[in-house]
Image (cartoon, rainbow, N blue to C red):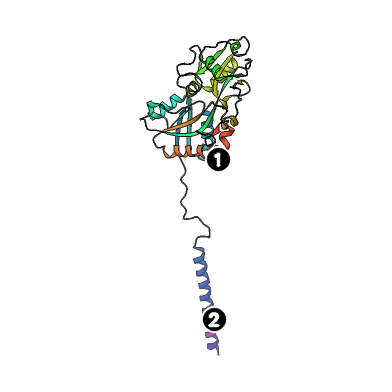
Amino acid sequence: MFATVSKKTLSLGLIATMTAGLLVGCGTKEESQPKSGGDSNAPKQEELTGKITASGSSALLPLVKHAAAKFQDKHQGVTVDVAAGGSGTGLKQVAEGAVNIGNSDVEAGDEYKDKGLVDHQVAVAPFVLVTNKDVSVEDISSEQAAKILTGEVTNWKDVGGKDQKITIIGRAESSGSRKYIKSALLPKDKDFAKDAVVQDSTGALKTSVEQTSGSIGYMDAPYADDKIKILKLDGVAYSPENISNGSWKLFSIEHMYTKGTPDKVSQAFLDYIMSADFQNNEVEALKFIPINKIKK
């Protein structure tokens, strides 16, 4: 009797032990599998590192500097150094390989035709004619503007204003803003007046117009504020809407040139500037116009 009970007990115990082992084994196997929805096999996104240098247009400077700050926030391992100096400087330096990106208000000229430059069009910069606030004129025609900038008209009374000497404040030869205004307003056989005061940056020009009685200058609209006056041109007031509908004629496509195909970090920076998020939110906030809102 004792032996029979022991065999049954042993049999039941063996079955229980085997069942427990199977359950433990199943549990171990299950735990070793990846959890549903896991990404253990997905490749990790490589963090960008490196340095980008850019120089050139002071008109485009606010946009590029803002983009640089935003881009560096997203990519802590990247440094973006941005300098002005004028469109001519930017084109020259990128062609020589001194910087990764050359910013310009105008297309690269024939002298850069064989330099391997690649054009990245990033925004539209509206340009305006501005005066010191003591100038009584509010509106001039394109013809009057040309005569003022070339020095043919030297007193505001000759274009409907008070008896006041006109002081022209412009940019240096390397400036894309200067080249653009010359092509947009001046006759082909004319140049800016020789006695024009020359400033090296748009910011310096704006300050000079603000501080000089009777002065007139030209700049991209993002720099203009209520310390100076924006003139109407041919009866049209400047506004982004008037650029889009074609009634305001002073604007240029803004370019960021690279020498050949950009390196990985520079390409990522350019892609960020051209992204829908930056174009639709940041570009207009900086008083530029998204590149896709203009007919080229």
Bin the neighbour count of mark 2 within 10 Å (Cα to Cα): few under 14, some 14-19, many 20 and up.
few
Residue 158 vs residue 228, the one in the foreground: 158
Q: Position of residue 278 (x, y in %)?
A: 54, 38
In screen coordinates, is 283 left or right of 107? right
> Alpha-carbon distance for marks 1 and 2?
70 Å
Tell me residue 174's x, y (percent): 45, 21
What residue is shown at x 54% (from left), y 85% (from top)? 8
Residue underneath mark 2: 12
Q: Quadrant of the N terminus?
A: bottom right
All told, the count of numbered labels is 2
Picture quarter containing residue 236?
A: top right
Placement of 68 over or under 188, stated as above or below: below
Which callout, 1 or 2, points at the residue further toward the start of the chain? 2
Residue range in magenta is 7-13
> Whole-percent x and y of residue 261?
40, 37
Mark 2 residue element? helix
Residue for point 41% across, 38% down: 263
Q: In this view of the protein, can residue 208 be seen by the observer?
A: no
Q: Which residue is mark 1?
A: 277
At a point 52% along the width and 79% down the height, the residue shown is 15
- What amino acid does circle 2 point to? Leu
Return the residue found at the far left. Answer: 114
Residue 272 in magenta? no
Q: Residue furthest bottom?
A: 1
Type of amino acid at the residue the image marks with label 1 = Asp
User: Is the Cβ of the residue at disc 1 closer than 8 Å to that at disc 2?
Assistant: no
9 magenta-colored: yes
